[in-house]
Amino acid sequence: MFRSIFNTIYFFIDSILLSFLILIYFIITISLSALFFFSPQKGEKISGIRENLLSRKSYGTITWVNLINLSAKNLSSRKSRVLVTITGLSIAFAVIVFLISIGFGLQNLIVDRISSVQETTLIEIYPQAGGLQKISDESISSIKEIKGVEKVMPIIAVAGKVKFKNAEIDVVAYGVQGDLIKETSKKLGKITGKIFDNNLTAVEPMPFPVQEIKGLETVTLEELLVNPESELTQLKINSTTPKEAVINKAMAAILALDEASFETQELSAKFVVLPNLLEDENSKIESLWETYKIVGIVDEQDNPFFYVPFVDLRSIGITYYSQLKVKVENEVAVKEIREKIASMGYATTSVLDTLGEIDSIFSIVRTVSFIFGLMALFVGTLGMFNTVTVSLLEKTKEVGLMKAIGMKNKEVKRLFLTESMIMSFIGAIAGTALGYFAGKVASGLISNISPSKEFIDVTYINSELFLLICIIAILTGMTTGIYPGRRASKISALDALRYE
């Protein structure tokens, strides 16, 4: 039992070593062929240099160069059969390379498109659905203290009513810092004009504004918060910062805004605050109309919205925020920081979640593609096994003669293993090239039917795929060469010489 295990391990290690020797042989031969491509005595020069470089390396009683040369000559003596075998094997490897490279290529294409429009180092933070934990100034301070956090940018989302010329619409309004627009510019797209530079989060110290209370005399906001039963209807924006707004293209289309001269345009807006943003959820706050100068338009056009300075909305009594965007140092830190924020009771999302789901989906796609490729490879392996086995029957006398002149059993085994390895490597190399070419043809066809007419490369061959092909080639050569090699090593020299 132990002897059998030892022989199996020895055979596996020996096969790996033989595979590397064959690869070195091919690399040197191909390099010399390129160097002496125009030389009239190319074959002689290549053989001479190769023998000088490699013939001193012994591999038992026969040098490994001679072993590979002998195997190559044996294969060349039956070119038609070997060519058919290698062709079948090449097609199998081409199927594997084509399908898996398409999987990698489509994944990279989607990931690149997502990464080009979304910042991968941003984390979005929301209150938990049904949870009691809200986003406040204390939340921002706690998150800022987490190692790896660069910026914490709060967002206030409210319902906005906008008047522009003769139009009046209801849209979503966001109170943000100028930095947030910059950090999300990938998603927003091209910005025409400019964005406001206001990054203030605290309201300037000013007297509380006068409120208009339905059915009551005017009181201050401070008095209203003390007496939450009062019915608040309107509140003036208490901010001295420039009143500037950035709108998106969808809103510009609804307003029929001339984008060529928008910088001279102004709109009137008032904001209705949701109760969940207030200290007292029974309060009702609506701002008075305020005039904003339109300073920029962003390309994002899914739904109409506009941005105003954060402090404008903060100044009308908002205590809690709709969400936060947190910028971290790098993608590696995203997971750990999200876990810490989640432990505070908040929900978090990141574009890396989407990328992770894409990776999971394409992992399944590549696995299924690999299984289909293995099915094709199985057919090619049967053909190669048949070729090597028939070769054994045809060369039984030669085997007997080689044993009679001193070749050892393990060297006879290596001879047949080398033949199968050579065919496997040639098939792998040819198949990889064929699969790569097929992938580029597929990319060209897809690019031609693409509306943009830009070249869309849907294939990608990385080092992992090359390593996979090498491993498959080695295993294929070992699998098809082990039986003929063992059978040849057990043939008696005397019986082999008498074989008809």
Image (tube, rainbow, N blue to C red):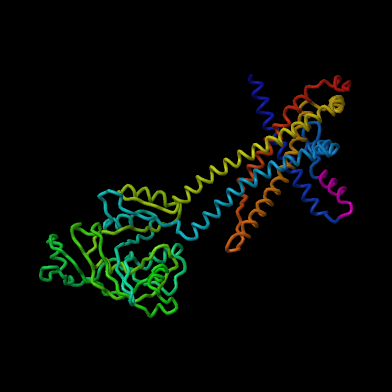
Where, by quadrant of the figure, is residue 270 drawn? bottom left
The image shows residue 194, relative to residue 119, as above or below, that is below
Number of numbered discs visible in the structure rendering: 0
Residue 346 horizontal/vertical position (percent) = 32, 50
The image shows residue 216, relative to residue 100, as above or below, that is below
Please state, as top left, top right, bottom left or bottom right, where the C terminus lies in the image. top right
Question: Would you say residue 48 sits in the magenta stretch?
Answer: yes
Residue at screen point 62% across, 50% down = 461
For this view, does 399 lie left or right of residue 5? right
For this view, does 109 lie left or right of residue 330? right
Viewer-proximal residue among 325 and 229? 229
The image shows residue 100, relative to residue 250, as above or below, that is above
Magenta residues, dominant SS class:
helix
Residue 144 horizontal/vertical position (percent) = 33, 57
Question: Would you say residue 263 sits in the magenta stretch?
Answer: no
Please state, as top left, top right, bottom left or bottom right, where the N terminus lies in the image. top right
Where, by quadrant of the figure, is residue 168 drawn? bottom left
First to last magenta residue range: 39-52
Residue at screen point 12% across, 61% down = 227
For this view, does 445 lie left or right of residue 319? right
Residue 223 horizontal/vertical position (percent) = 13, 65
Q: Residue furthest front?
A: 166
